[in-house]
């Protein structure tokens, strides 16, 4: 990992490989290492860029609230700092997908294609939004352990929990290593994020939608609706996977993403 300073702020980023740029944007409350199977695989054929979002992993700590648009702006500045002028294939999971919508909205000329993994287009319900704000308050008082206790069982499917205990341990460690102020800031930002359903029909770049067959956070039926609303989008449902499909079943995800990338008009 290298550290890039942008306007006096430090951002951690992994860069590997050469070729067309593939930007991997992690979910909440994780870091770039959730993409390790994809980094290893696609670095053989692409310039892989896997940043830690503001406050996460090796990036500068943050507080207050960070909007999804704010994260998108950070990524645009990061690409500038890395001298990446070519449009990127933007691959985001969960919160990374929320950021993808805003990146596409603000910087469409910088997007060659979208890969949307286990994410949502609708805004939070009042109940979910309220839960996020409550977590933001609680994590500042108690730390991240309760966040890990609550989230880890929901992020993977039962098969993963039994067959890949090391994966659960890795996810838990990612959460525990995240600063509570960062968790709170992201939760506040997600609670305030807009509904982007009306934007879907205007997406004009090739789009791949990826969903774990057992994802209970971004259910397959909801992801199918997203794919149906985006012109020409393709959806792939990943067996033996929940919300963390790229980690739970990387071979199938990598094959789907690789097929999509090979068809892009860079």
Image: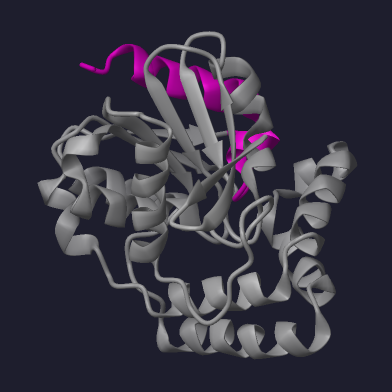
Q: Is residue 192 above or below residue 43?
A: below
Q: How many marks?
A: 0
Give percent across and percent down for residue 163: 86, 37
Asked if one can make out residue 87 in the rendered structure from this viewpoint, the answer is: yes
Residue drawn at (19%, 49%) of the image:
229
Give percent across and percent down for residue 157: 70, 48
Relative horizontal placement of residue 246, taking residue 112 as reference (left or right)? right
- Quadrant including the C terminus: top left
Q: Main secondary structure of the magenta part?
A: helix
Front-most of residues 232 and 173: 173
Colour logic: one colour
| Residue 241 located within the stretch drawn in magenta | yes
Q: Which of the 4 quarters of the picture holds residue 183?
A: bottom right
Residue drawn at (71%, 75%) of the image:
180
Residue drawn at (59%, 60%) of the image:
28
Q: Is residue 216 above or below residue 202?
A: below
Q: Residue furthest front?
A: 8
| Residue 265 located within the stretch drawn in magenta | yes
Front-most of residues 174 and 64: 64
Give percent across and percent down for residue 206: 23, 30
Front-most of residues 194 and 69: 69
Q: Is residue 223 above or below residue 114?
A: below
Q: Which of the 4 quarters of the picture holds residue 22?
A: top left
Q: Which residues are magenta?
A: 239-266
Q: Which of the 4 quarters of the picture holds residue 147?
A: bottom right
Residue drawn at (38%, 50%) of the image:
223
Front-most of residues 213 and 30: 30
Relative horizontal placement of residue 120, taking residue 240 as reference (left or right)? left
């Amino acid at each position: 990992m290298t550290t890039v300073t942008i306007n006096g702020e430090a951002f951690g980023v992994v860069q590997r490989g050469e070729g067309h740029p593939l930007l991997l944007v992690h979910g909440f409350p994780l870091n770039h290492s959730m993409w390790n199977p994809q980094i290893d695989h696609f670095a053989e054929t692409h310039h892989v860029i896997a940043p830690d979002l503001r406050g996460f992993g090796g990036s500068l700590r943050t507080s207050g609230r960070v909007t999804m648009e704010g994260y998108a702006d950070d990524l645009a500045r990061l690409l500038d700092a890395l001298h990446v002028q070519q449009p990127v294939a933007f691959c985001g999971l969960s919160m990374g997908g929320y950021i993808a919508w805003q990146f596409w909205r603000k910087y469409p000329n910088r997007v060659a294609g979208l890969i949307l993994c286990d994410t949502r287009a609708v805004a939070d319900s009042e109940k979910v939004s309220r839960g996020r704000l409550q977590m933001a308050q609680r994590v500042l008082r108690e730390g991240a352990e309760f966040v890990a206790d609550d989230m880890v069982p929901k992020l993977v499917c039962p098969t993963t929990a039994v067959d890949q205990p090391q994966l659960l341990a890795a996810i838990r460690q990612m959460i525990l290593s995240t600063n509570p102020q960062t968790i709170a800031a992201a939760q506040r930002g997600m609670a305030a994020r807009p509904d982007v359903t009306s934007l879907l029909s205007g997406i004009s770049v090739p789009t791949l939608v990826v969903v774990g067959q057992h994802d209970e956070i971004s259910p397959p039926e909801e992801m199918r609706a997203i794919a149906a609303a985006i012109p020409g989008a393709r959806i792939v449902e990943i067996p033996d996977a929940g919300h963390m499909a790229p980690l739970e079943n990387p071979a199938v995800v990598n094959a789907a993403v690789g097929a999509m990338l090979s068809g892009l008009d860079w």
